Each structure stands twice: as C-alpha cells, then as structure tokens.
Amino acid sequence: MTKFAQVVVDVPTLQTNRPYDYAIPAALTDTILPGMRVVVPFGKGGRRVQGFVTALTTQQHYDGDLKAIDTLVDLRPALNTELLQLSKWMADTTYSFWISCMQTMLPNVMRAKYEKAFRIQGTIPEQIRTEIFHNQAELLYSEDLSDQTLRTLSKLQQAGQLETVYHVKNRARVKTQTMVTTVLKNRAAFAAASAALRKNAAKQFELLAYLERHPETVPLKQAEDETKLSRAIFTAGAKKGWLELSQQEVYRDPTRDTQIEQTQPLQLTADQKTAVDAVVAASKNGSDRTFLLEGVTGSGKTEVYLQIMAAALAHGKTALMLVPEIALTPQMVNRVKGRFGDLVAVLHSGLSEGEKYDEWRRIERHEAKVVVGARSAVFAPLENLGVLIMDEEHESSYKQDESPRYHARDVAIWRGQYNHCPVLLGSATPSLESRARAQKGVYQLLRLPERINGQPLPQVTLIDMKAALRKNKNGNFSPQLLTALQGRLIKHEQSVLMLNRRGFSSFVMCRDCGFVLKCPNCDISLTLHMDTHSMRCHYCGHEEPIPQICPNCHSHKIRYYGTGTEKVEKELQELLPEARILRMDVDTTRKKGAHERILQQFGSKEADILLGTQMIAKGLDFPDVTLVGVINADTALGLPDFRASERTFQLLTQVSGRAGRANKEGKVIIQTFNPEHYAIQFAQRQDYEGFYRHEMQIRHRGNYSPYYYSDLVQVSHEDEGQAAKMMFEIANRIKPILSDQAIILGPTPRSIARINKKYYYQIVIKYKHEPRLHAKLEEILETTQTETRHGFQIVIDHEPQQFT
Ligand SMILES: Nc1ncnc2c1ncn2[C@@H]1O[C@H](COP(=O)(O)OP(=O)(O)OP(=O)(O)O)[C@@H](O)[C@H]1O
Ligand SMILES: [Zn+2]
Ligand SMILES: [Zn+2]
C-alpha cells in the first residue's frame, strides 16, 4: 500500500530543491500517480503551494508528523515517467532547480497561480465583518484594497483574529461548446410531442421539425444559426425532454482558417535517399545514433525530414521536429501539415496560451503523432518516439538563456537514448561542435552537397563599403546593389534584402557634445523605437520619451544614429519609387499573424522587395527570388565573442541560400567593411567545409570550443565591490580542484558591467576533463545561494552561447 508521496514543491530555492514527504489521504491512494500535480501545505501560516509527485513510497523517510496532501490537481500525470526522469537529469546538468525544470516542460497555463486571502479566525468587530468581509469567511487580497483597510487587517492579524491563506489556482481552461442531442427516437415520439402542443406554438413546431431532421448531435450554436430559433426555445425543448444539452470539449485550432494542400512524397535524389535510408534503418533497429545532415541551402533537407518521419509513423512510432523560432514560418508548418495533416501538432510562441495548451493535450492523448515546434517543443509529451529531428541545428536560440539553461540538442539526444531512436541534426552550416563530433565519429555524417535544382549555389559579390562610402557619404546602398535591384524590378523578379541587426543599435547622440542617452539602471545606450515613439532599454525594459533637446548641453542637434530597417526602407523607397517594399522586423511582426501575412504577400508577388532583419535569413523558399542583398555584413564581427566569425559566416551563407532556389539563377550582393575577413571570404564561396577547417585551427590555438568546454560563473550585487569580492572568493575556491590543463579567465566585469542596477562579475573556466568541477560548482551554488539574503545572485552556465 502506498502511503507516502514525495513531492517537489513550487518554491524555487536551493533549500527546497528536493522532494518532501507527504502523507496520502485515504481518498487519494487509488488515484495518485507520480508526475501528477498536487496542492500541499508548505511552511507556516496556512500557505498552500503546488508541487509535483516524484515518487510514491510505503515508507516514511522523515520521522516526525507528516503533513498530508490537500488535493490532486491532475486526473492523470502532467509529466510522464520519461519527462519526470528527464527533469531530474536537466536539473543536475544545468545547475537549476528541479521544480523549474518540471515547469519548463509544461504549457504556461499549467503553471500555478497563487491567490492570497485573509481568513477570519477569531471574533472580529461586526462592522468589519459586514463592510470589509461582506459576511464571508475570506477576503481575497487585491491591490484595490485601501491603505486604511490593509492597516486594519494587519492589526487584526497581529491580534491573531485573522490569518493569511494562499490558494492555488489552476489557470488551464478547457474550452467547451454546448451540444444538442435529440432524445425523441421515432416518428411516434415526435407525433406525440406535436400533439401535446398548442396550435399557435409555431416556434416549438419548428424546433421539433429540426430535431426530426437531425438525429445526430450538433453544436447548439449551429442549430441556432440554422433554425434562427433563440436559445430559450432550445432550453424549453430540453425541459420537455425532446433534446439534451451537453458540454463537449473543443480544441482551439491555430491553423483552422488556413487551407493546407495535401502533398505526396517526392522522388528522392540519390543523396537524399542515402540519408533517409540511414536514419530509417537506425529507427527500425532501435538505435539511438545521432546523425548530422550537412546539406547546402536548397538541397532538399526538409523532404528528407518528412520521409524519415513518415517511415517512423508507418512503424507505429511518433516523430518530433524542432525548428528555430524564426524559421518556424507558416511555410515550414504547411509543409509538415501538408504531409501529415491532422496528425500534426504545432508548438510555437505565436500561439495563444489556450492554443498551446490544446495542442499539448492533443499530443498527450495520442491524437497528434508528429510535433513541429521551437525550442521548448523538445519536451512534447510524445510517447514511443521513432525519431527526433533538429533543423538548423547551429542556431544559438536552441539554448535557453535563462534558467533552466538547457540546450535543446542535449535534451533531444537524451530523449533519443531513452526511446532507443535516432536523432537527426540538420543544417547547411552546422555548429563547429556538431561538425567536429561528426569528424570524430561520435555523430554519423550525412551530406547533401548539391542543390535540388542542379544549379550551382548563387554567385556572391562582395562590395567594399569603405570605398562606396567615400563616394556617397550617408547612403546605405552601393551603386552595384542599387543597379541589381533595378534590374530585378524590370524583369519582375523578386529580391530579399537583409539588414543585420546583431551587435547593432539605433541610439540617440547629440551632435554638439556627443552625449548619448543611456539607461538609468544599466550601462548601455537606449534604443530608439519608432513604433512606440520612445527610447527603450533592451536589458531592463526601461522606457522614456525621445529627447528633443540634449539633456547635457541643451542643443537641438540631438539625433539618432545607426540604421534601423525603417530608415533603410525610407531611403530605398526614395531611390526606387516604383518598388513595392515589404518590411519584416520586430516592429512589423509584433501582431499575431503578421509574420505569416507578410510572407504570404511576398509569396503571392504583391511586393518586389522583402526587407528585413535576420528573421528573413532562414528557411524561406520563394522560387522567384533571384537577388539577395546584405546591407551590412559585419556588424556582428566586432562582438567580444569567440563565435562572432562563425555566426557571421552562418548568417551570410543562410541568407545567400534564399536566392535562385528554383529554375532561375540567383545572385547575391554583400556589402561589407571587412571584405578580407575570412568569415566573409568563405561565405562568399559558400564553402562550409573550408570555413570549418580554418575556424577549427583558430579555436585550437585559442583553446576554445569544441576543443575546450567552458563554464561561466557570474555573480551580481548592487554594490560593485561586493560583487567583485565574491567572484574572487569563488575563483579561489575553484582553483585548487582544477588540473593544470584547465584555464580560468577573470574575474572580470561583464562587458556591460551594470544591468538593472546590479553589477556583474564573472569567470569563465575552460577545460577538457575536470571530473571534480561539476560537484564543486554545485557546492558553490549551494553555499552562495544562502547569500541571496544579502543581495547576491549567482548564475552558472555550462557552455554559454553568449560571452558578453
Ligand atoms: N527530391 C526532390 N525532388 C524535387 N524537388 C525537391 C526534392 N526535394 C526537395 N525538393 C524541393 O527543393 C526545394 C528546396 O528544398 P528545401 O527547402 O527542403 O531545402 P533545404 O535543404 O531545407 O534548404 P535551406 O537550408 O536553404 O532551408 C523545395 O522547394 C523542395 O520542395
Ligand atoms: Zn536598462
Ligand atoms: Zn549636447
């Protein structure tokens, strides 16, 4: 008999980062299962928190009086056995709280919300009971309560007449619709019902006639529309026993309004077939091998994914496909839905919380067997996985940059091992880490070296902007790029223009005194946002009006610097008045469905030029695009990050790949201030293998990834001296356990030292093999965490993606 449950509570601190024992009330013993969410009392003062049952036991580990579980939140486990195990592994490897890992796996609406209330305990003055508590036993805390009321309540609480209680609220709502089912079964029953009516009850006769024509269950809404009868008539019919009204669950379908054409598998090329066969064989054999598919842009990687997933389904398995958020275009979703129809569930940030919850439940109930989604979709509760696919595997957005700092690639590989199925990583420009693993045989390399259309990769021309700028002072467009754009307009072909926004901002500067408007909380300049007409801090969200005069010298010559897409669009429109331009950036895609609409307009040739940020670089497949222009190739090259070259190369290669994908030849023009830089040179030749070999030498010399692992330890505090001191102490605790092969960089202030009023200091530990490091870092995390009371915060990030 199970009597006790181990519960990890929703209190993310180190002290509580372990399961607590709870007694199981007799009423729940038959239903409770690991992975279910429960509400339990925790700590003092009637506080109620949500928690996850991690195990059931017959023995009590803690001796003392056990508290009992209040209620079950779920009727079936929210986390299945696999995900429960995965959450534990994640917590251990990412230096994060177990509870945070479990919550990360679930749709947002399933996260608990807490309500605070005052409950009457003793006798309170009659006036307060009637006027404040409205004769109820409890009063919900709200911000609307006046200060005076709060003071009164606080006094009563101190006198022991009130207590504060917490309620756990479940926000997950199932959407339902009312259904009409005819109860009358045959002619005779209808005749009897009619006979009992008064002659002038016209509407009731109409209802009977409708019910007789519709023996099936129909939505009430539909029945109302078809009969034009009011709801009251249906309710009356229910009272008379003619029909039954019931609630039926409905899904919020994010793609309800789009018609998706069914597609058939294409005849594979020889290279595609080799790739498909290798992964399908592994899937059938239950092998958990990881494959790396290195296929040039336009080589037909998506078709490879689709056919591998189809094979998994044919064997009664399920399939998961991850795509970076920005590449999760309607185009990609439609391709997968076009092949697998209703078996597909889609998970991405564009969905409402309700839609995500519904998609999640469709997966959980085995109604969806294929999942396409962005990073967190790696936790989709698919069972019996036959393959996991990760498209654009080099994308840094697969690593979550807040706790839990997991990399979706590592999670996918873990799930592959658990499910005994292969993992396929695909990219035209694989990360150096993955490519190096393929070199060593840890992953199996599969290649698609040629484009599907048999055409060569587009020809790339570099334009030296140093020279161009000498001729034309302020312009963003070189004469070559402009001429090429004009040429496409004449031929009615399309162009894609990319403005590289990484490492780049539009800030306001005074032309008289050089004053730059900075965030009052952080150390960085505020960014101009034309859509909201304000200056905003990208780190802390601080917002203020655009200054009209310089706060420093009162000059009126305070202007913004740098190039936003909006400004480029204006300039381009002046240069090419007849061109129809679509702009795609964070500002124009903020509204739901806007992204989709812009791409659809471009696809149906309602525009000649698609101008956008990085978000246009990936996955787009438009046959009439014959020109790709990159306005500024090198803004990211100067970032203090050893991956700057890799990121630049990847971005340029990806965006170049948008040109000439069908039967027309493509051309690419890249404007750069560093035409000799090797990343730009290799991108010009779209020579991934060449770049890989060159960059590996540089990484080798600098002791960087993939030759070395790195762990970042960062401490923050409001007082700069305290932050630095703590960082030095930590470094000194780590040093003794490291071998002489390991390297510690720092302590140094972060490149942006102050963010949101806090100072950041960090060290980076670079190492090949340090068996004692992990435990040491866990220990440091634990001991430092108790210092949070004194305003310290610590972050440990294994293999950070950003070093700034
Ligand atoms: N075997 C095939 N026969 C005919 N057409 C194909 C075949 N495989 C793929 N295609 C078509 O080739 C085009 C390019 O394929 P896809 O978009 O999958 O390339 P990709 O490798 O994913 O490129 P990128 O990395 O640039 O996104 C698509 O329009 C696709 O429908
Ligand atoms: Zn700020
Ligand atoms: Zn000034």
Image: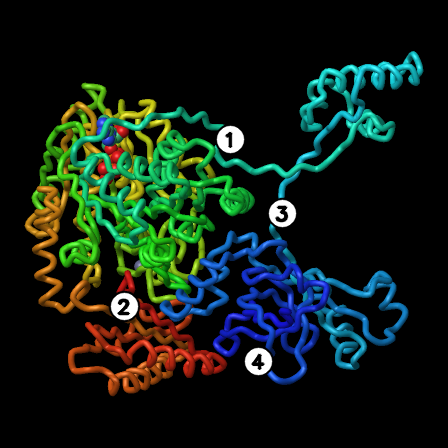
* Label 2 SS: strand
Q: Tell me if mark 3 has few (under 14), some (14-19) or many (20+) residues whose alpha carbon lies within 10 angstroms of its own.
A: few
Of tags 4 and 2, the one toward the viewer is 4
Q: Which mark is residue 777?
A: none
Residue at left offset 14%, top offset 69%: 703
- Which badge, 4 or 1, comes first in the chain's sequence? 4
Q: Amino acid at mark 1?
A: Arg
Q: Mark 4 and mark 2: span between their CA atoms?
A: 48 Å
Q: Residue 203: percent from the left, percent from the top?
A: 83, 17
Q: How many marks?
A: 4
Could you say which is closer to the camera, residue 634 or residue 508? 634
Residue at left offset 22%, top offset 43%: 278
- Which badge, 3 or 2, comes first in the chain's sequence? 3
Q: Tell me if mark 2 has few (under 14), some (14-19) or many (20+) residues whose alpha carbon lies within 10 angstroms of its own.
A: few
Q: Quadrant of the N terminus?
A: bottom right
* Label 1 SS: loop
